Image (spheres, rainbow, N blue to C red):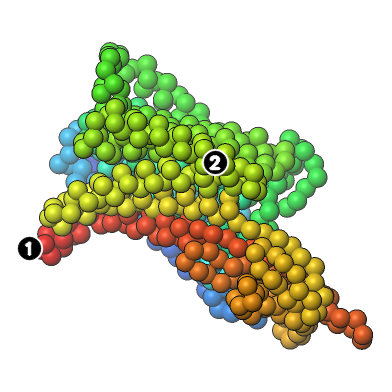
Amino acid sequence: MNPGDLLLHLNPLLLLASLAAGALHLRDGDSEKRLLQRVSLGLLLGSLTASLLLLASYFYRTALEFEYVADYSAVELPLRYKLAGVWAGRDGTLLIWCWATALALNWELWRGSGAGEDSQPHSDAGQQRLLVLFASGILLALATIQLAINPFTHSDPVPTEGRGLNPLLQSPWMTIHPPIVFTAFGFAVLLYAAGLAALAAHGEAWLDVGRRWGRWFWLLTASTLTMGGYWAYTTLGWGGFWAWDPVETSGLLPWLACTTFLHAAVMSKRKRQYSLLGPLLAMLVLLLVLLESFVTRGGIWLSVHAFLPTQSEGAVQRFLTVMADDTSVKGLVVLLGSCLAVTGFTTVRAYLRAPATEPRKREKLDEWLDEDTTFFGAIYTQLLILTVALVLLLMGVNGYLPGFVFETRLALFVALLAALFTIYTLQRWYEPRRLLSYCIAAAVASAILGFILLGMRPGSWMAGAALPWALLAGWATLRYLWSYRGKPLLPRLRAWGPYIAHLGIILIALGYGISYGLDQVETVELEEGSATEAAGFTITLDDVVMRSGDESRLEAQFRLHRGGALVVDGTAAQVNSAGTTEWRTLIYLEHHLTRDIYVTLDDAVPSEGDEPSSATLTVRQIPGIMLVWTGALLTTSGMALTMFTDWAPGKQWLRKFNS
């Protein structure tokens, strides 16, 4: 047994010791058992850290005697892509998931709310102990699954060359995107445990834990969704940043659930509301993370992503095949089913035990549009958006659902959410009746503009339909930000953080509608020296060249003119790396403030003898795309600002700076 094997088999034993010590401490309050639990979890974090460093060292030296290294590395790979092999497959990514869970768990036990357990109210202390136990139990399940996909398994026989990293994954984004994804997955375990502890025992400890790790999960997931979109847009040649592919959609669902949870947590903190819904939403995040893992790695859904196989069998047969052949996927399904059962049982139990509440009577318009009601409506509208997206994902298991299916089904709920957000934000300055009239006007303008643009091209209605709502919600956001301009720095930034994030989401939604609704796309076939019209330009093919070396490059050199003026003199290419049969696209991309110029080479034939060269090129003008990237930056910046202003050292620094 090699050192990596030893460490992976040690992890479940440490978790069993931690669970036993934690259960005994919960029963009798023995401080020695509490210390044993902390030591066990501390050793677990050390073991997982050592496992990751050991695996990284094997990739660093291309240790082909290990099967996982041979599958995802090669001697000639650049160092950054060798190290990226650590998280190129399920074995390494699950190890990062376990490590991140252990990191968050130790933080809670040693430095977080658990550090002051003796001074907490009895109910909070008991809830905190349960939280650690529940998270340890889920981590035990993940560590057990890890034994089935052991990255330290020896190769038999030992290959002379590694397979290397898939050329599509040889991107700078590969070095940061996957580890951030699975670190966020680890934090989702703490979210689930916090929600479960809240339903199992009374106390307020769960809320601070849930908000802390919910914010981290939200920030990291928003960042990776942005990275993944930009990666697809600039590297893969798809011509877009979002396609409602099953992998993309399943990755969006946990973020939507966490968004809804964080909104519910606001009212839970302020007014002690959502005592049942809040924990349930926290638990839902991990359930959707497990579903995402199954969708991504199970191969049940057919996806354009390269790491999922294309299969001809039906969905049921694919599921049965995976369950029979893949122990790790079977483990994920069992874990998902167990978490669903526990969630359902505890939710029903908590609901039956909850005291009955009198329904609030609302008679006047002001009472229907007050702060509590609009906030409540916004939370449930977010849940509806999440539910519709989930149902469509499940419906697409037997075949790919085009993007317009999602867009048309979700548009009405997004408009309703924008209306509720506007009314909630502006009600301190304007009468509800006046705000309602603004929303009705926006709805009418949205319908008219959407109808006017409907005939231009498929999806063009989105640009017209999105614009009035974006202007209304954007004005509400800016009005709120402006109202805090004279406040001291700390309360001002604390108020600004969430609304900067909201402004970013508004820009993303508007940018999506414009970029996919008003883009111009045209594919043309050209011979050398010929020209034609495409996507608002005159395109001329100058030459097609095949270049050989470490990789084969098929290049098409072209020019774009508009009104006689040269706009682009560029090259689009396809590349074939040595030893592979797959050609990948190198796009020509030119960013502008108002639109991007995007050209891809679909096919090309160099000149032979008297035959001129020819090429098939796709030309795109994509307007409004900068709104998406600007919105993504504002969204993540707003959450980072919110977290900084809620962090004790951050508060102290801002107070000193302000003084």
**At which x and y percent is residue 369?**
30, 26
Residue 383 figure quarter: top left
Residue tagged 1: 659
**At which x and y percent is residue 76?**
65, 81
Tag 2's secondary structure?
Answer: helix
Residue tagged 2: 450
Residue sitting nearer the eye, 447 or 408 = 447
Residue sitting nearer the eye, 488 or 449 = 449
Query: Mark 2 vs mark 1: which is more N-terminal?
Result: 2
Residue 195 visible here: no
| Above or below for 342 versus 469 | above
Residue drawn at the location 50% of the way across and 58% of the way down:
624
Label 1 crowd (10 A; few <14 / some 14-19 / many >=20): few
Residue 533 figure quarter: bottom right
Residue drawn at the location 67% of the way across and 65% of the way down:
619
Residue 515 visible here: yes
For the C terminus, give its image quadrant. Answer: bottom left
Tag 1's secondary structure?
Answer: loop
**For the residue marked with disc 1, what is the amino acid?**
Ser
